[in-house]
């Protein structure tokens, strides 16, 4: 762990709380909006079953991926605090534009800009944590932040519904501006964590060189790919679980409580992992979680094949949940090990991991989602392939680690 003097008077608990809030801002920008879709359809004179508002989520995610290309290299060049202020200012302004959007076109544009802005806090949180910590403390802090991040899918809709009780859907977007102002004000207490002599020149060639350098390191590259492959399963869960519960099991009302229960368990598991990482090495924890992902996926496929494509509901629920929780447990530890060798290049490396996760994870998820047709078999096969691939990549990364 770095010296306390370099990081001013911000204590560990406050630091972790701030990083958790900053990290969760991207998820909250989506989750708080979902309960407002009905009111928004009325405001924009859309049919009750119109799917046009789903584009506000898609554009946000696209913007989030695009923004990673900029904010990662920017923070390695200009420092953490200036880029954090810039991204939070863009976040607040985009949310305000969405709140006052007179047409769907303006709303779509604001959501794209909002997504770009939200990628800044996401990258900066990982880079700042890497500046402050290394080794076991890095993994433990990443996992603690994951504890709070996992609660965003629960808190977001609750916040959105509460706002709608007292105001219009526009206030839901206005809440994003309030979050940005609070985070920016709170962030004034955070000292700069990247020294001037460690900063990289800002140019296109330097950015490309930095991205190549991050992915050229065998530890960073293989862990990043392992994370991305696992997110293929996670994104598939987000996109298909409601369909699976409805079409395969005839239980559409189970999706919301199941999603919320899984988020609570995920948060509890992350907190447990943060304690365990005081005694267990981060790469060992990531490997154990990867093995659990593989085991749960294997049992899930066997249960599916012996049940003609639709395993018994409770067995499916247990194994499907176990597979998802295993990857969620692996992600923060694997990310910390991937960032460990990067040093001053942590911002660019975090961006590279985010880009890889977003693009490759989404593509792999689409392969599963498009194959679901009255059977759970494509999901089970996909999960096992991704779990196996992730394990292979982890073993390759571990061979490159220096344990001396």
Image (spheres, rainbow, N blue to C red):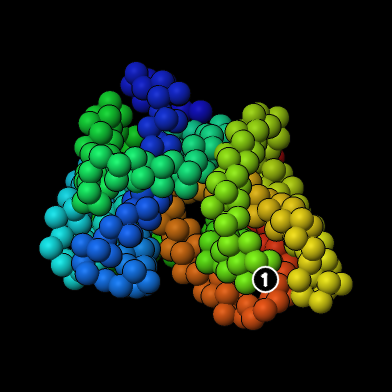
| Residue at 23%, 43% in the rendered image | 167
283 sits to left or right of 351: right
The quadrant where residue 136 appears: top right
Q: What percent of the width, then of the height, locates residue 191?
A: 30, 29
303 sits to left or right of 42: right
The residue under label 1 is 248
Residue 335 at least partly seen? yes
184 sits to left or right of 16: left
Q: What percent of the width, then of the height, locates residue 67?
A: 31, 60
Q: Secondary structure at mark 1?
A: helix
Disc 1 crowd rating (10 Å Cα; few below 14, some 14-19, many 20+) is: some
Residue 393 at least partly seen? no
| Residue at 49%, 41% in the rendered image | 151
Q: Is residue 53 above or below residue 125?
A: below
Q: What percent of the width, then of the height, locates residue 124?
A: 36, 45
328 sits to left or right of 194: right
Quarter the C terminus occupies: top right
| Residue at 46%, 64% in the rendered image | 358
Q: Nearer the viewer, residue 388 or 384?
A: 384
């Amino acid at each position: 762990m770095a010296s306390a003097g370099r990081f001013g008077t911000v204590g560990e608990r406050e630091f972790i709380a701030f990083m958790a809030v900053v990290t969760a801002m991207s998820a909250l920008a989506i989750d708080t909006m979902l309960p407002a879709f009905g009111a928004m359809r009325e405001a924009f004179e859309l049919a009750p079953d119109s799917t046009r508002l789903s584009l506000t989520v898609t554009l946000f995610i696209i913007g989030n991926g695009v923004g990673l290309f900029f904010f990662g290299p920017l923070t390695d060049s200009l420092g953490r605090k200036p880029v954090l202020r810039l991204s939070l200012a863009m976040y607040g302004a985009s949310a305000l534009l969405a709140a006052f959007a007179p047409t769907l076109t303006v709303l779509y544009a604001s959501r794209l800009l909002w997504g770009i802005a939200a990628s800044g806090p996401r990258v900066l949180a990982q880079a700042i944590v890497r500046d402050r910590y290394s080794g076991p403390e890095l993994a433990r802090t990443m996992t603690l932040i994951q504890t709070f991040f996992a609660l965003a899918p629960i808190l977001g809709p609750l916040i959105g519904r509460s706002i709608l009780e007292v105001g219009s859907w526009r206030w839901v977007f206005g809440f994003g501006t309030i979050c940005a102002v609070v985070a920016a004000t709170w962030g004034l207490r955070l000292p700069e964590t990247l020294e001037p002599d460690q900063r990289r020149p800002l140019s296109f060639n330097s950015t490309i060189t930095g991205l190549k350098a991050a992915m050229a390191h065998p530890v960073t590259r293989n862990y990043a790919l392992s994370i991305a492959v696992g997110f293929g399963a996670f994104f598939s869960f987000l996109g298909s679980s409601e369909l699976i519960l409805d079409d395969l099991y005839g239980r559409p009302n189970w999706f919301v409580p199941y999603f919320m229960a899984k988020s609570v368990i995920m948060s509890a598991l992350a907190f447990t992992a943060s304690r365990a990482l005081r005694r267990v090495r981060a790469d060992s924890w990531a490997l154990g979680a990867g093995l659990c992902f593989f085991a749960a996926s294997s049992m899930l496929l066997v249960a599916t094949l012996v049940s003609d494509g639709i395993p018994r509901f409770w067995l499916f629920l247990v194994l499907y949940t176990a597979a998802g929780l295993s990857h969620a447990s692996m992600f923060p530890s694997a990310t910390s090990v991937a960032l460990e060798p990067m040093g001053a290049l942590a911002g660019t490396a975090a961006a590279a991991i985010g880009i890889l996760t977003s693009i490759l994870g989404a593509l792999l998820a689409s392969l599963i989602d498009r194959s679901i047709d009255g059977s759970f078999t494509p999901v089970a096969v996909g999960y096992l392939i991704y779990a196996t691939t992730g394990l292979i990549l982890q073993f390759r990364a571990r061979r490159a680690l220096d344990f001396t």
